[in-house]
Image (cartoon, helix red, strand yellow):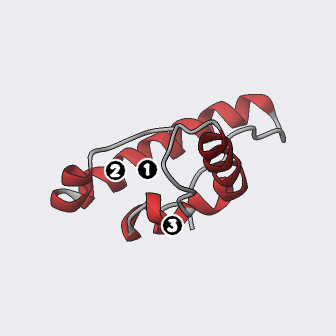
Amino acid sequence: MLVARTSLAQSRPDVIKEIFRVFREARQVDAASKGALDPYRFGVEANRRSLEHIIDFSYRQQMIPRKFTVDELFDDLTRALGA
């Protein structure tokens, strides 16, 4: 998982898009060496179920004050990446 500051995402969405592009390209190079198996999931939608589990576990362990939705954790730009 990659994390970027909200201020960066808001002020320089081009940087966020470029970071995503570079990581996706690196994944494609690595996946090509593994054949058909692609263990990497990119984007919010591809990881939504895992993120929901993480939120649930974090809430049950009292690490967060409430159960956030996945959409609350990502801005519009980030949710659109990988779609």
Q: Position of residue 55 (x, y in %)?
A: 61, 49
Query: Residue 21: which numbered mark, if any?
Result: 1
Query: Element type at marker 1?
Result: helix
Q: Which comes sooner in the sequence, label 1 or label 3? A: 1
Height in image: 32 above or below 15? above
Q: Nearer the viewer, residue 22 or 78?
A: 78
Amino acid type at mark 3: Asp
Q: Is residue 35 above or below residue 47?
A: above
Alpha carbon separation for disc pair 3 and 2: 22 Å
Q: Are marks 1 and 3 in contact (CB under 8 Å)?
A: no
Residue under the image location 39 percent in, 71 percent down: 76
Residue 80 tag number: none
Q: Position of residue 83 (x, y in %)?
A: 57, 68
Q: Residue furthest left?
A: 11
Q: Are marks 1 and 2 in contact (CB under 8 Å)?
A: yes
Q: Which badge, 3 or 2, is on the more N-terminal residue?
A: 2
Q: What number is the disc on residue 18?
A: 2
In this view, the residue in front, 60 or 50, is: 60
- Residue plotted at (82% across, 35% down): 35
Q: Position of residue 66 (x, y in %)?
A: 53, 55
Tell me whether circle 3 and circle 2 mark residues in contact (CB < 8 Å): no
**Residue on which disc 3 sits:** 71
Amino acid identity at mark 2:
Glu
